[in-house]
Image (cartoon, helix red, strand yellow):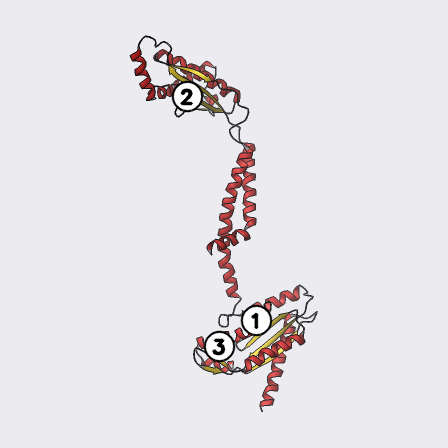
Amino acid sequence: MEIKLYLRMLQKGWWIIALTILVAINVALITSYFTKPIYQASASYSVSPSASLAGSDQDVLNSLEALDKRSIIQTYAEFLNSQRIYEETVQAMGLSMEELAETSKSTVVLPDANILVLTIQGPDAVLIADLANKVGKNAIDNIKQLYKVYDINPLDPASVPSIPIRPQPVRDAGVAALLGIVIGAALAIVSGQVRVPLEAYKQRASLDAVSNVYNRRYIQNRLDEWTLKGNPETYSLGMIRLNSLRDMIDTLPANVVQQLLREVTATFKKELRGNDLIGRWNDTTFVLVLPSTPEIAATRTVERIRAKLLKPLLLSDYGENIQLDPVIGVSSFKMGETANDVSGRAEDQLDRFNQKESSAQA
């Protein structure tokens, strides 16, 4: 059930997700446009036993054991990554460290291989390729002065890169789009969770707390909206006053009155269509709004409901029969009228009907 609720939230908040994706992609593209390109150049080196080891088999065995432990390779990696060797190479190229402030270096040992990879990143593609090769050469010269057992030799020299590693607008836009989907979905869900209580509050504010149908303010607002929009379709207004409620509301317990009114509204709902509106006009009167219904048809409907309400209403929880004594009034909307005109005529009819009933009983 919760999954369906979240899916509905995402469906309603699709525009939030779309907007978030669009913003994320635009931010990524703008950032890529103003970001200085950074290139990467890598040079690889192989480590192997020296060709001058023909004299001593024991030395070869010992050195192979040391190579298996990879201590020599890690040592050579430290040479390639040495800050001293790096600074010496920079000075030999006639550069300063300040000029290479945006340049970085790193050395890794490939797993399960006697291969070292020196990587240099920076904004100048030609310079970093030249720097990677010269740092590697300088490191090899220093290594050969100290270690004779193993040779380190260039495997693949660094070449001038043509494509920066960052920014990459297409890749960055794709990542931004995925991030936008995640953030947008989260915002849509949060928005939905906020909107649901607000909608529930609005709905409660439009309902009569006792009878659980629309209150008078809501009905009047709906009628005013139809009138202001110049609704070309007619609607009819039926009012049903339950005369016996005048005394019951003041004497019966509140929970009994609530059950009574909800039994009455249940009768209304059984006799009306799905798009008809039911409201509580005042303490004893209900209003029925019947869209697209002429006055003659509306009168038949309201009279049918009155006939149902003339029968004593049984309150099952209390075992009591309640006589409601209903009277009715019906009017229909005519072009040029206001909502107050329509409701006023219906109330006048209620009064005339009530007087007629009183005269007949007398």
Q: Quadrant of residue 239?
A: bottom right
Residue 60 drawn at (x, y percent): 32, 13
Front-most of residues 235 and 336: 235
Residue 230 drawn at (x, y percent): 68, 65
Residue 281 seen in render: no
Amino acid, disc 2: Leu
Q: Which mark is residue 260?
A: 3
Q: Residues within 10 Å of mark 2 (few under 14, many from 20)?
A: many
Residue 96 drawn at (x, y percent): 46, 18
Image point 31% across, 11% down: which residue?
Answer: 57
Q: CA distance from mark 3 to mark 2?
A: 88 Å
Q: Quadrant of residue 47?
A: top left
Do tag 3 and tag 2 residues touch (Cβ < 8 Å)? no
Residue 21 seen in render: yes
Q: Quadrant of residue 350?
A: bottom right
Front-most of residues 265 and 345: 265
- In this figure, which residue is indicated by the disc labeled 2? 116
Task: Give the answer, above or below, for where 128 lies relative to 211.
Answer: above
Amino acid, disc 1: Ile
Q: Residues within 10 Å of mark 1 (few under 14, many from 20)?
A: many
The residue most toward the bottom is: 362
Q: CA distance from mark 1 to mark 2?
A: 82 Å
- In this figure, which residue is indicated by the disc labeled 1? 278
Helix, strand or loop for disc 1:
strand
